[in-house]
Amino acid sequence: MNKYLDSATIALEAIWAAKLRSFMTVLGNIVAVTSIIAVVSLIQGLNASVRQAILNQAGADSFNVQRFPITRTDEEFEKARNNPRISLADARAIRRYSSLVTSVMAGSDAGGRVSYQGRSIDNMRIQGVTGEFGDFSSFDAERGRLMSPTEVDSARPVAVVGWQTADRLFGSELDPLDKIIQIEGTHFRVVGVSAKRGTLLGRSQDEFAIVPLGQFQMLFGARRQLALMIKPRDISLVAEAMDEATLALRMARRLKPRQADNFALFTSDTILDIYRSATTGIFAVLVGVVALSLVVGGIVIMNIMLMVVTQRTREIGLRKALGARRSDIMAQMLTESVVLSMFGGLIGTFFGGVIATVISSFTPIPASIEAWSVALGIGITALVGLFFGLYPAMRAARLDPIEALRRE
């Protein structure tokens, strides 16, 4: 251990003695690690933000039934375009035939104008729901309360609004509870305000209003697309409950055994998998391109270490004459190469974190600096230093002490 500590001390002294040369040597590593840390931090932040947004909308403890599946080709879309609309009869069939289901909510959404005493928000998301919506974790009320099943089933003009909707309409000086707002010209009483959800790529997830489905259909028409949100008895029974729901819908729609499903089932994991499959390749290529600069940095380090071996020929010869073995010389040179490379990695990690934080502060893209990405960046630079320092170290170890001492 002392041998490696001594080699590290010598390496740090060599770096400090030639500060400009050392900086130029590891510049490639600095740029590479800076880019990797910044890119990975932004990717992690974006993934976390998308995941949270999907969980807020779809719920982690439920699954959805929709009219259309995910289609990737025109042929798949043509097959699905004639699927019948999701209806309240489908919801009743699932309640009747599925023993693993505890709640079935029907819902629809549209963009509408919401106003209060001269303040208005255009094209805001208006969501109509049935009475079971309170059973799902994606609906909450930080202030006030949720609409009661009786209020929803009797289509009373009440609403739960998002955090930013309340902030924009009422500001900090007014309590939104029990205030009368207008949605598409119809009066609604605010009974609750949802907790803050944040933004996704600059788009707020807190501008919405939830109203009874009956009121929604009076505002936007009864032929709006419906979707079902279904909650199983236990989260571990999601797969079994989806099978029962599928069977119930096929029975209700009188589909023959050979006929394909004319509906689609989704979970939050399904949507996340689609997102990952669409972005994983892009992110991998992006990180790979950035990582190529590490190879350039490694080649620069190898060239510098070869030059160092030439400059320190007499020193190496003297050490070998005093009893240093080949392994000692190799250990010294490899340690210097690794320390030099990791020095660039540490600087790059710092700059990468700063760049990711600045981008997150001034753009809608979130950043998340993970400990594993920092360890990965520094670890990769250590491997680069080890790999590209191997040849110079072997060359130094092979020097003949007599010939080395003769050189001036």
Image (spheres, helix red, strand yellow):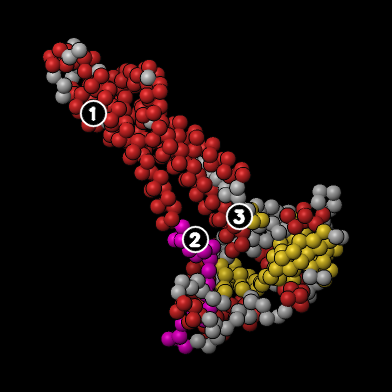
Of the image marks 2 and 1, the number of the one nearer the N terminus = 2
Q: Name the residue under label 3.
A: 200
Query: In this rendering, is residue 126 above or below 379?
Result: below
x, y percent for residue 84: 57, 83
Which residue occupies 35% across, 19% down? 14
Start-end of magenta stretch:
256-279
Q: Mark 2 points at which residue?
A: 275
Residue type, mark 2 in image: Tyr
Q: Mark 1 points at which residue?
A: 392
Which residue occupies 49% across, 60% down? 275
Residue 384 left/right relative to 164 = left
Residue type, mark 3 in image: Leu
Which residue occupies 36% across, 27% down? 339
x, y percent for residue 319: 21, 14
Query: In this rendering, is residue 315 above or below 231?
Result: above
Residue type, mark 1 in image: Pro
Q: Is residue 399 magenta?
A: no
Cα distance between the residues tagged 2 and 3: 14 Å
